[in-house]
Amino acid sequence: MLKGKKIVLGITGSIAAYKSCLIIRELVKRGAEVQVVITPAGKEFITPITLSALTQKPVISEFFSQRDGTWHSHVTLGLWADAMLVAPCTASTLGKMANGIADNMLITTYLSMKAPVFIAPAMDLDMYAHPTTQQNMERLKGFCNHIIEPQSGFLASGLEGKGRMEEPEKIVAYLDNFFEPRDLAGKKIMITAGPTYEKIDPVRFIGNYSSGKMGFALAEECARRGAEVTLVAGPVAMKTEHPNIHRIDVESAQEMCDAATNTFPKMNAAILCAAVADFRPEKVAEEKIKRIGQTMDIHLVPNPDIAASLGKMKHERQVLVGFALETNDEQQNAQHKLEKKNLDFIVLNSLRNEGTCFKSDDNQISIISRNGQKDYEKKTKTEVARDIIDELAKIL
């Protein structure tokens, strides 16, 4: 959620200063506007020209930019920014920040900052472990700053410690997570994801091409926005990242139905994103079926309808969201499913949209409710998840 955010990036005299280019690139990629403030020592490690090319803004280093009296206002920067990030932050700058030693433009900007300040320390491991550095960090935390802990390493003494600056993508992800809306705080949401496998024999099954990417993106988005998420996942290779996601792994449609119906009564909402098999073999062979003759018949029987089951269970304070993947008569079929299964809204996607749906990182959806239909452009599944959860948050 960094789109449109104004970020002051403070760069100090550390060998890790080159990583600031990667930080800027990530911030700009996510839609942020970046203003660099660099210490004189920082310019020994990276040139302002490089930084200016990435931000499309002149780099600020000195109080006065020219000999004619033109000066940079640290107060203005403090009012302009939505956040300040000091990365890399040396032990020297850390100490100055903690003790208010305003001897350069970066420190005066920090002291004037009205927005949250994030600090990514970068220094020798023994320096990081020194009591003075630790005291300065604790003092800065007491001023409501956010310390992005450095990576683990080993001290000269042989003891495990920290020091090397956290990787740029993780630093930016920390900021991104900070600005995520917490509109789902206190809510419990169940999400189904992935395919189901219906066994034919011990080595064969009936399944589909679902990768689980859409469902996992929805789970991560809900968790980032404060929800406690239960993810009922079919057989996929994906992993969850957010600690607020409790995962239940299943294989068959019956197992998914059992998990969903047991979980749903405790939930505020459920999003049924899984590609559940409609049918399963009536009989499962105990041993691998051998090839005999030229044909083989498999008699299929219906699987339980999870959406319909939860639709019957739903009470007035719960929200139920379904998915519809169609190949023809998309809107008509989705509208019918919405009414029949007592859904609050349904997310429609189509195999006609090339480069979306199964295995793809992109999707193109329409959201259909009783109030009408809203169409979206093709986006990454992460962005699509945000659109869907925006709609969910409005009615929760």
Image: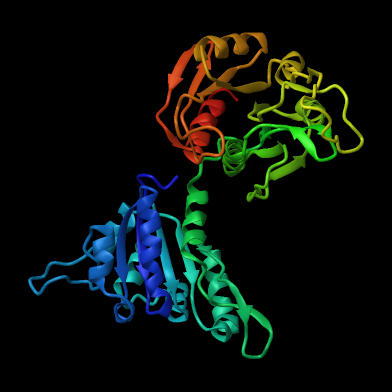
Q: Residue furthest right?
A: 286
The relative height of residue 257 versus residue 34 in the rendered view (above or below) is: above
The relative height of residue 54 versus residue 152 in the rendered view (above or below) is: above
Q: Residue furthest left?
A: 68
The image position of residue 232, as x and y in percent, is: 73, 36
The answer to which quarter of the image holds residue 215 is top right
Can residue 188 be seen here? The reply is: no
Can residue 307 be seen here? The reply is: yes
Q: Residue furthest front?
A: 293
The quarter of the rendered structure image containing the C terminus is top right
Question: What residue is drawn where x is 54% and y is 10%?
Answer: 370
> Observer-nearest residue: 318 or 200?
200
The image position of residue 158, as x and y in percent, is: 68, 88
The image position of residue 53, as x and y in percent, is: 24, 62
From the viewer's perspective, tell me whether residue 7 is left or right of residue 151: left
From the viewer's perspective, tell me whether residue 258 is left or right of residue 363: right
The relative height of residue 313 versus residue 246 in the rendered view (above or below) is: above
The quarter of the rendered structure image containing the N terminus is top left
Circle count: 0
The relative height of residue 74 versus residue 273 in the rendered view (above or below) is: below
The answer to which quarter of the image holds residue 55 is bottom left
From the viewer's perspective, tell me whether residue 160 is left or right of residue 22: right
The image position of residue 79, as x and y in percent, is: 32, 53
> Observer-nearest residue: 366 or 141?
366
> Observer-nearest residue: 56 or 338?
338
